[in-house]
Image (cartoon, rainbow, N blue to C red):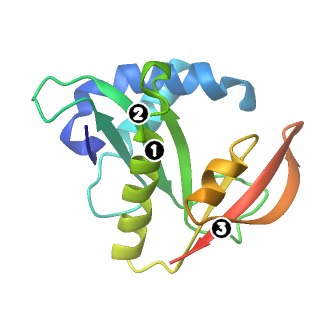
Amino acid sequence: MIVVPLAQRPDVIPVLARWLYEEWGYFHEHDSIERRTAELSARLREDAIPMTFVALASAEPDAPAIGTAALTPDDLETRPDLCPWLASVLVDPRYRGRGVGSTLVTAVVAKARELGHRRLFLFTEDQQALYARLGWAESDRAEYRGHPITIMQREM
């Protein structure tokens, strides 16, 4: 497995857009695969926020995507005071439990640090234990679009 900026493999955008829509479409009233595709296409950067990373099954040129994560300036419009965010961490169910998610989180944290950020935020509905194992601490609990969430942060 390798993790690269999505800018290096834009051909996997349709797969990632579908995954993200299927996983979190309920958060956005007018969400669609097309909206997710446009959002991913706008994140084809390697050294600036927003950017998306993709985990690939191998270093082969046609290796399939197995996960994704993003580094974004905002992820909760209710908390514009917090920036930047780890967002959209998602692993293909067939590859869960193999460290793919942890590797993606590590890549985003490293990029945020490289870009000069000293703190990073995320929100999750149910993965608090995973993020705590990776060095994140709970900073707030809230409700977002009718769903209870935990906001977490990581000092770098």
Helix, strand or loop at mark 2: strand
Above or below residue 136? Residue 56 is above
Residue density around tag 2, few if under 14, some if 14–19, many if 20 or more, within 10 Å:
many
For this view, does 50 lie left or right of residue 137?
left
Please give the residue where the numbered disc 2 appears in the rendered image: 67
At which x and y percent is residue 33?
A: 51, 19
Q: Which residue sits at x=41%, y=33%?
A: 67
Please give the residue where the numbered disc 1 appears in the rendered image: 69
User: Image quarter for residue 59?
Assistant: top left
Q: Which residue sits at x=45%, y=44%?
A: 69
Please give the residue where the numbered disc 3 appears in the rendered image: 153
Q: CA distance from mark 2 to mark 3?
A: 22 Å
Q: CA distance from mark 1 to mark 2?
A: 7 Å
At which x and y percent is residue 73?
A: 54, 61
For this view, does 102 lie left or right of residue 7?
right
- Decide which of 150, 98 is in the foreground and name it: 98
